[in-house]
Image: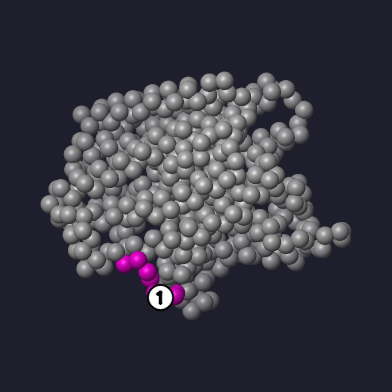
Amino acid sequence: MISALILTVFVIYFVTLFLISKFTSKGANNQTFYTGNRKVPWHVVAFGMIGASLSGVTFMSVPGYVQSTQFTYFGVVLGYLLGYAVIAFVLLPLYYRLNLTSIYMYLGERFGAFSHKTGSFFFIVSRLLGSSLRMYLVVFVLYEFVFKIWGIPFWVPAVLLISMILFYTLKGGIKTVVWTDSLQTIFMLAATIITVIYILNKLDISFLNLFEQASKQGMTKMFETDWRADNFFLKQILSGAFITIAMTGLDQDMMQRNLTCKTLKDSQKNIITFSFSLLFVNFLFLALGVALLFYLIATGTPISEKADNIFPSVAFNISPFTAVVFVLGLIAAGYSSADGTLTSLTTSFCYDFLGFKEIKKTEEQKTKTRKTVHIAFALLFLFCMLIFKPFHNDSLIKIIFDIASYTYGPLLGLFAFGLFTKRKIRDKWAPVLAILSPIICFILNKYSIIWFNGYKFGFELLIINGLITFIGLFILSVKRGKV
């Protein structure tokens, strides 16, 4: 009964997305797909970015993360504010001044073709892996609680969801994504709030009493003071800042949304408004984590060892209504990440590897090529989702940040060297350094406890990665004007 109800709601939800797509893609051209013709209102972008930045991983993994790390994740969120300030007042002015479609075109202008393609390549790898894992989580839950009951194999819902994203983004691109993100943010936040209210009613406890009891039990610990711990509070804050700079400011997916705003000033208002809203939203997800754990304890339900299973298991056990609300929120969270990713991957490949800015083709030829690339990335997306299933044994938010530490580090180093030095690099060495740096970081991370008196790397490995790339670029660089 619940499975049929969820499937019905899912169909209605997709029809709604399709109608939005029809409206936003009316009269669309290639520039609509890539930049939204730079006519999207900034407040629409800001609200939609909440869903895009959080995704299905935050929706499920952050509440489950409370079980093992309490509220120490909020230190990362505080660091976000510093990162978004850098994006608003350092990176966005650069992107608007150069009138970029793909932000990695900056690396080409600053260093050369090898650096340009290196930056784009690392973005493509990062987003393919990260976003496919985010979408995998949506498919995983739908499979476990809906399709598995009917004996339908895992690949069927995976193909279904990717096909739907491809269907509604193929024409309107980023303009459609920005508007559908707003709808999906509403559903994701509503699902979280409704679930918390339902749990509080079930437990007959107020929100304040819940936090009082959670505090007494040590669940709300926000700052870890052991410097050797991977969630030491200073590391969390600093890592949050650099995660934001790398995974938003140097990420084509997130910046493509910002570049749809009419002016630089509008884009900056979007970033600042959005950054402060994330404080409230992430706190809400952590509060949900506390409510979920209290519900499991109060009902005597065994707590799943897999953090990502905590939220769905509770939602499906409370009532059919909370099950439907949860699935709606999860689909909204997953789609708000995947649709933008698919669009940005297409944009990056077309401009960074196919040279759409310089290539002499008609608009019709470019449109045909763009659609082919879009479909190809959808297939890659699907492939990554399918091969990940056997390895899902940890909180996905940790896995995604671990991947980002290795793949976004070279981007951080390349952009930092370009912005904060005036030196010229030996461009052909950029790919070598970008590959060597993550390898060094992997070795450091593997043996850090032995080599550094018990010290464990956390999210700050991203900073180390970027620093190694930066130092390597400096060693192989010369002053401007020299060869």
Q: Nearer the viewer, residue 470 or 428?
A: 470
Asked whether 458 falls inside the magenta stretch, the response is: no
Relative to 110, is 210 on the left or the right?
left
Q: Residue furthest left?
A: 204
| Residue at horizontal 26 percent and vertical 68 percent from the top | 218
Magenta residues?
A: 221-228
Residue 68 lies left or right of residue 25; in this view the side is left
What residue is at 47 percent from the left and 30 percent from the top? 165
Q: Is any atom of residue 234 visible in this view?
A: yes
Relative to residue 457, is residue 121 depicted above or below? above
Taking the spot 65% from the left edge, 41% from the top edge, the residue there is 102
Q: Is residue 56 left or right of residue 23?
A: left
The image shows residue 298, relative to residue 134, as above or below, that is below
Quadrant of the image for the C terminus? bottom right
Q: Is residue 355 left or right of residue 88?
A: right
Q: Which residue is mark 1?
A: 226
Residue 68 in view: no
The residue nearer to you, when weighing 122 against 357, is 357
Q: Label 1 neighbourhood size at 10 Å, few (<14), some (14-19), many (20+)?
A: few
Q: Which quadrant, please, contains the N terminus?
A: top left
Q: Residue furthest bottom?
A: 453
Q: Position of residue 291 (x, y in %)?
A: 23, 54
